[in-house]
DNA sequence: ATATTTTTGAGCAGAATGCTCAATACAGCG
DNA sequence: CGCTGTATTGAGCATTCTGCTCAAAAATAT
């Protein structure tokens, strides 16, 4: 997996700014040939560096305005059954294994605080879960984005 | 913002399963007319329930294999300048305001542990930051996904 | 039952896609 | 310095998708 060079980064940046941009539009904007853009995008995708375009559904739109981060401590090493049980809860939209005080971190959406309480109880019922610690997300200052990273890579040299 | 009904959910599910699917393909797969799919997608987008398609760049591909969650405690209410300073660090790929022990949660990528240490120091230099707590992400068991939520909504009735 | 909304099927011009090919520019290397 | 392999470019072409409109049919509400 070779690193993206500055041209790749510029393509990705343009795509980040306008995800709907067509290959033709990207080529125009960047002053490259359509074939070049097409070839590089293909390579980036095949090497796994560019994931599939995801049309992200906002949980708020589905009726889940509440976002929480729940740190989960599990006893012993009953990893898998615990994770599976947790993943069966639809409101768990992301699950990470972490170091530190907790062992798992779940990103959870909920309809309201009462709903969140219900989900927390569900979590505690999963096998091996001994403790949970809930943090409410008050504001998403910056949703996930690698734009600034790409900007760094877009400058010639400076791997 | 009216809630998505089961047909919307089925469209979104199909799109989640195959983000590259064209409107025509979706219509075929779901047994709907192309116009219907097109109209509903348009409505979902205009109501903000369907975000722009984002082609996600994997930070690993850019050379940042390490992912960490850093809880940040800030003194007083110097919110904005602190947040701006933190957002100027390219390795901060997400930033949330939270309740609980910390005040901010930053999702940070790094080239290696030494790099992470450097970034942590950068964070501590931001105005108002008094303490930070770093958690390493060992495994992304389940990347962000609302699929199971959509599946629930895809069943007729059951708002 | 009547009115309103949604879905459907059809058509059409413009554009993008995926592909191939050959010429040119660029790179590293002996 | 010149050679050689690679990347870029421009062109072409068949197929497909898009965005749009329109009118009939179906479903839903009043």
Image (spheres, coloured by chain):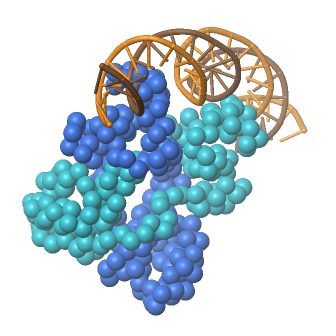
Chain colours: A cyan, B blue, C brown, D orange
Q: Quadrant of residue A149?
A: bottom right
Residue, x 15% and y 53% (percent of image)? A85
From where the camera sits, is residue B63 visible?
A: no
Residue at (43% x, 63% y) in the render: B66
Residue B114 percent across, percent down from the top left: 48, 73
Give the farthest residue toward the bottom.
Answer: B76
Query: Which image quadrant for residue D29?
Result: top left
Q: Position of residue C17 (x, y in %)?
A: 58, 27
Q: Is residue C3 left or right of residue B122?
A: left
How many labels sit on residues? 0
**Along the horizontal axis of the image, is B114 left or right of A28?**
left
Q: Is residue B45 visible?
A: yes
Quadrant containing the C terminus of chain A in the rendered view:
bottom right
Q: Is residue A21 left or right of residue A64?
A: right
Q: Residue at x 45, y 90 (%)?
A: B75
**Taking A1 as reference, is B125 above or below it?**
below
Q: Is residue B45 above or below residue C5?
A: below
Q: Position of residue B14 (x, y in %)?
A: 35, 33
Task: Relative to D16, say whether A22 is above or below.
Answer: below
Q: Residue at left 46%, top 40%?
A: B43
Along the line of sight, the residue nearer the viewer: C27 or A44: A44
Where in the figure is residue A108, as x and y percent of width and height? 28, 60
């Amino acid at each position: 997996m070779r690193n993206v060079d500055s041209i790749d980064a510029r393509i990705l940046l343009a795509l980040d700014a306008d995800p709907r941009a067509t290959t033709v539009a990207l080529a125009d904007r960047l002053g490259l040939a359509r074939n070049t853009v097409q070839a590089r995008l293909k390579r980036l995708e095949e090497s796994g560096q560019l994931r599939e375009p995801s049309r992200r559904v906002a949980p708020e739109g589905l009726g889940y305005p509440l976002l929480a981060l729940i740190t989960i401590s599990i006893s012993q090493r009953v990893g898998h059954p615990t994770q599976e049980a947790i993943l069966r809860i639809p409101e768990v939209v992301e699950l990470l294994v972490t170091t530190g005080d907790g062992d798992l971190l779940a990103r959870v959406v909920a309809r309201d605080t009462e709903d969140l309480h219900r989900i927390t109880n569900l979590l505690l019922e999963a096998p091996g879960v001994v403790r949970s610690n809930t943090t409410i997300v008050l504001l998403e200052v910056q949703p996930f984005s690698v734009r600034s990273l790409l900007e760094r890579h877009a400058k010639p040299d400076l791997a």
